[in-house]
Image (cartoon, rainbow, N blue to C red):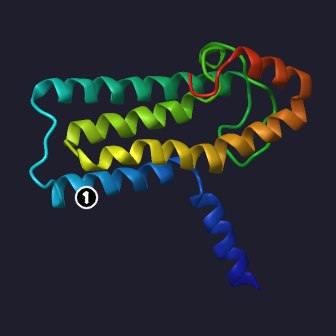
Amino acid sequence: MPIYWAISEMMRWLDIPPVWLAGFLLVGWYQANAFSLGLSLGAGWVDLIGGLLLGGGIVLILLAVTEMRRQKTTIIPHMEADSLVQSGIFSRSRNPIYLGDALILTGLLLYWDAVLALVLVPVFVWVIEKRFVIPEEDRLRRKFRADFARYAQKVRRWA
């Protein structure tokens, strides 16, 4: 029984968005380096767009983490929130960290010229929504009821 508990606990801590992002990035990097099939999106402008998306994703995550720390609530997805953060970047997007993750994935795939791996972006968004966004919003809806309902009406999920 202790081994099952240890494995279960380890899997719970591995089931976090940065681990999922790292996995998708690894697949994209591998595709770019091992199976490019001679496909390319072009020259320097793709690198520029990739860099802008990467930087934008990092900025979104930093803004969100700063706001969540300021509001003294958790950034760990499977934990109960102490407050409903509606200020700062959260007044524009209900999920700026996950949006930032998607921008980072897209930016690096463009930078690496991983053309075939670009299909991973919608798959990543789908996985994150099913594994994290919907369960998180369900917990927030149960805990903050009317406040969350008003917030969800005002602010889009993936804005």
Give the vertical position of 138 relative to 64 (above or below): below
Q: What residue sits 65% from the left and 46% below the top?
A: 132
* Image quarter hosting the C terminus: top right
State which quadrant residue 9 falls in.
bottom right
Tell me if I can see residue 71 in this picture. yes
Residue ID for mark 1:
30
Give how far across and how far down residue 137 sits, in percent. 75, 37
Residue 103: image x %, image y %? 41, 32
State whether residue 76 appears in this view. Answer: no
Quadrant for the N terminus in the image: bottom right
**What's the residue at 66%, 27% (across, down)?**
69
Q: Is residue 15 above or below residue 144?
A: below
Q: Residue at x 50, y 47 (%)?
A: 18
Q: Is residue 44 left or right of residue 73?
A: left
On screen, residue 1 versus residue 99, left or right, reads right
Q: Which residue reaches farthest bottom?
A: 1
Q: 116 or 3: nearer the eye?
A: 116
